[in-house]
Image (cartoon, rainbow, N blue to C red):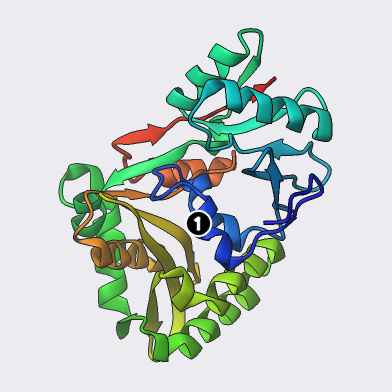
Amino acid sequence: MQATLTGREVMLSDKQYFPKRSPISFENFTNIYMWRKVMNYRLLTVKGVPCLTGHYGNHPTFCFLPDVAEDEMLRAVLEELRRAIGSPLLLRPLDAEKLERVMRLYPDAEIIEARSMHDYIYLQSDLSTLIGNRFHQKRNHINNFEKKYNWEYVSVTPDQLPLLRETAAHLFAVDGRLPDEYEAILEILDHFEELKVKAGVLLVEGTPVAYSIGEVMCDDTALIHIEKADRSYDGAYSMINKLFAGEFADCTYINREEDMGIPGLRKAKTSYHPVRMGEYSIAKV
């Protein structure tokens, strides 16, 4: 890596510099790679340590906590980042362990709870079966979908990538509200095999109405990167959610990422009854 504090764009070959199989969705390499342009992620080297910074729009630059074993070295790296980026330095996302370490180094740090960044984590068996009274309404949506439509589910293989591209383009044309997200989706589609992701497409009479993309992120947990459906097809979201969850039968949990503070998204993710939340904070040091 080039030793510079100006940094450079993240590349596929940089996967080696990121935490291996982290349970934090923000630290997942596919997540970082797909959003690298939208989030202006830059990879730089400080005292030989790879560091990742980012900023969205006019928001302040933030930094992921560098992966350094020794506290003394970590503090030296953070001090260099503070001089280069500015003080206070924003560190995010910090789980309980990372937060404790930062507080040990910077007892006077300002800590901000980042509720909108919390990961929603579910039992795979809950999402793939929807058994129990809690999921009665979800099962009704699926039953209505199955009765109303002549549907087919396709587990995407590399030779079916054109179908996945067609589906993503079609649903963006239907919705069209989030061009930044569509740009990130195209990053996954362009490197589907290299990123080792899975995808599923839901068709009605041959027309794509929903799709989802995800991967196994750590030993017992899958991560859902993208889920999109045409809302004019009643139950399409419930259907793709259930079917794609079945792709991860070897996992105990499914992480469906954060809600970004969007009320409707928070309501939808809560309605699937997460078994726990991945709780993260921001530290100003």
Residue 148: x and y in percent read: 31, 77
Is any atom of residue 282 visible in this view?
no
Tell me how many marks there are.
1
Q: Is residue 196 left or right of residue 273?
A: right
Tag 1: residue type?
Gln
Query: Is 91 located above or below residue 195 in the figure?
Result: above
The part of the image, by quadrant, that contains residue 48 is: top right
Q: Is residue 13 left or right of residue 46?
A: left
State the residue position of label 1.
16
Query: Is 170 located above or below residue 26 in the figure?
Result: below
Residue 142: x and y in percent read: 28, 65
Residue placed furthest toward the top:
108
Query: Is 85 located above or below residue 125 in the figure?
Result: above
Asked which secondary structure carries label 1, the reply is helix
Q: Nearer the viewer, residue 15 or 198?
A: 15
Is any atom of residue 121 visible in this view?
yes
Q: Which residue shows up at 58% across the image and 29% down it?
A: 114
Q: Is residue 57 left or right of residue 125?
A: right
Quadrant containing the N terminus in the rendered view: bottom right
Q: Which residue shows up at 71% across the image and 48% down it?
A: 44
Quadrant containing the C terminus in the rendered view: top right
Residue 265: x and y in percent read: 52, 47
Crowding around mark 1 (Cα neighbors within 10 Å: few <14, some 14 to 19, many 20+) is: few
Residue 103: x and y in percent read: 56, 14
